[in-house]
Amino acid sequence: MAKPHKPKTVLIVEDEADVRNFASRVLELEGYRVLQAGDGPEGMRLMKEERVSLVLLDLRLPGHDGWAALQQIKSEPELSAIPIIVFTASAGVSQRKRALSMGAVGYLVKPLSAARLRKAVACILSQKR
Amino acid sequence: MCLANITMEQKFNILIVDDDVNLASNLQYILEVEGYTTRVAHDGQTALTLCREKVLDLAVIDIKLPDIPGIELIQKLTELVPGMEYIIATSYASLETAFEVIGQRHIVAYETKPLNMDHLLALIQQVVERRQAEEALREERERAYKYLDFAGVMLVAVDTNQKVTHINRKGCEILGGKEEEIVGKNWIDNFVPKKVREEVVAVFDKLMTGETESVEYFEHPVLTKPYGVTYIAWHNTVLTDEAGNIIGILCSGEDITERQLLWQKMVEYEELDKLKSNLLSTVSHELRTPLAIIKGYSTMLLDYDKRLTQEEKNEHLRSIDRATDRLTELVDHLLDMSRLEAGLLQLDKQPTIISKLMKETVAEAKVRAPSHEIVLTPTNRLPMVDIDAKRIRQVLDNIIDNAVKYSGKGTRVVVEAQRVGQELLISVADQGIGIPSDELERVFDRMYRIEQRLAPEIGGVGLGLPICKGLVEAHGGRIWVESEVDKGSTFYFILPIETRAKRRGNGQAA
């Protein structure tokens, strides 16, 4: 696994602290630089301030604004190219289709193991040049 | 004697008052030939006496009588028989007297003697025909009112001062009052609920000022006796007199209460449906989140064991532990709720020392929430009560935890228990965000989550209060809340003090 000189930055947008901390810790152990946000607006702010390579977005953010956040990010020209993997507690096929049609590159269902998380992130980021 | 004139529907009664006996007798004869019934008086007193005995329709009076002046007699007779009409006969064509009588409604004519019989008969015939026409009109009107009474809609007529002038039977039925009680009262002030008064007055004004002739359709409730409200759909039009002036408004109203109730039910069901799907997605989320934590951290501990410090590993294990607690609580809540609803919840009632229970509960609550000031009001002389201590403890814990959850750090939560008659009253008061008055009952509804609206960042499924309600009611008690938004809430519940406890306490060894 060739790692770049500068660690890539991954943003995790998730309101449950324990889940956020777990994902963040795993990715740090994998050598990524991790940023954390508790809601959509905070996530978008960080995306504009920092150079983010990948976003992990929880669709079931408070007030259901996970979907709204996905929409907004994809509609902003400076942010729309950044790949987004969504995670959610809902396993429905229609949800998956909808997320993908809205521009998400990947879909992860909770409960999530450390291995699946790291594989999904690695897969997307190794495709990037 | 001839038969009565067959065009006359009822016998017309004429009083002849003249001191000239022959004249009176002649007149009587002629009138009776025409089919009228007559009575004769030769003086005022007799005339009065006759009128007391029988109602007479018309009097032919000589102004000059031996005892009472004609005019005065007429006044007296009018008092006795208000509807009677008069033809004055006199030998003197006195202008003064003529002026006196002209214009008075009940005086038909002023004839000079010698009387022209044809003329007199013609006059009387006119009076008869007029009376018949009036009678027919009255009957017609009564029939019309009868139809109004049978109408399935309520009809209310109001005058320019908003006073009720007419109301039909359906209207009385709907309003719950008698016609006498309703007519004459101000429509707006007495029968229209405060909150719609402005709207109704606006509509009335539009009609009264001639802006529109009729207002097609609008709905507003009316106040009914004793303390009810009925929903009516109204059609209003103006009432005008012969000159075209607006004299009032006719309101035709249809009772739409049933329709309204059905509509409300429909809205309720839609809301309930929404809440149901909300609940499902909330429960799904609440279940999966602790599972995600457990899965995540346990796989992490397995995969990265060598690279983690012991400190970190312990921290993650604690997270796993907390998550399982969370899951356990949720599962317990769901099971409790199911049992309560199925009526399968079993209580293990034992005589319990309340003061001890309260002290323990509050002590542990303080440990759980060091950020708040939790106070137990001193308990004295609290009886032993037959309760399922574990369940009542559950209720108390839940309510106290809510109080902490929904109020700011450093605020007070006051817990109190007191005996009130044959009941134990327990209360938990906080200084938190409060509950709007229209939601005070709904907080105990299992599908209602106040959190979503007021404090979306506070999580939880919200089954706690419905379960508390179920548990308290299973004990034969009652639970409720009083609250003011931004000031705080106080939750109360009462438990009946079973006399069994006392008996058991006395009968058994301690």
Image (cartoon, coloured by chain):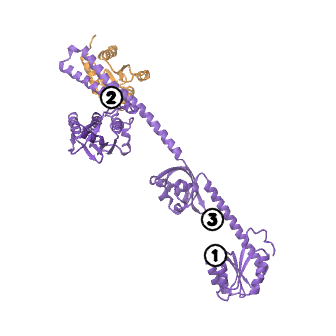
Chain colours: A orange, B purple
> Where, by quadrant of the figure, is residue B313 drawn?
top left
What residue is shown with label 3?
B243
Chain bearing tag 3 is B
Q: What's the CA distance linking mark 1 and mark 2?
A: 89 Å
Q: Residue at x 59, y 60 (%)?
A: B239
In the picture, the disc for residue B332 is 2
For residue B143, what is the image quadrant? bottom right
Screen quadrant of the C terminus of chain B: top left
Which structural element holds mark 1?
Answer: loop
Looking at marks 3 and 2 on the same chain, the residue that comes earlier in the sequence is marked by 3
1 or 2: tag closer to the N-terminus: 1
Query: CA gap, disc 3 to disc 1?
Result: 33 Å
Q: Residue at x 22, y 45 (%)?
A: B381
Going by the picture, which residue comes out furthest to the right? B2
* Res B161 label: none
Of badges 3 and 1, the one in the foreground is 1
Residue B271: x %, y % from top left: 44, 37
The answer to whether residue B294 is left or right of residue B74 is left
Q: Are callouts 3 and 1 both on one chain?
A: yes
Camera-side residue of B116 and B1: B1
Q: Residue furthest front?
A: B507
Q: Is residue A127 above or below residue B74?
A: above
Q: Amino acid at mark 3?
A: Ala
**Chain hosting mark 1:** B
On the image, numbered disc 1 is attached to which residue?
Answer: B81
Mark 1 touches mark 2? (CB < 8 Å):
no
The type of residue carrying mark 1 is Val
Disc 2 on helix, strand or loop?
helix
Residues beneath discs 3 and 2 located on the same chain: yes
Badge 2 amino acid: Asp
* Mark 3 and mark 2: Cα distance apart in space: 80 Å
Are dots 3 and 2 in contact, CB under 8 Å?
no
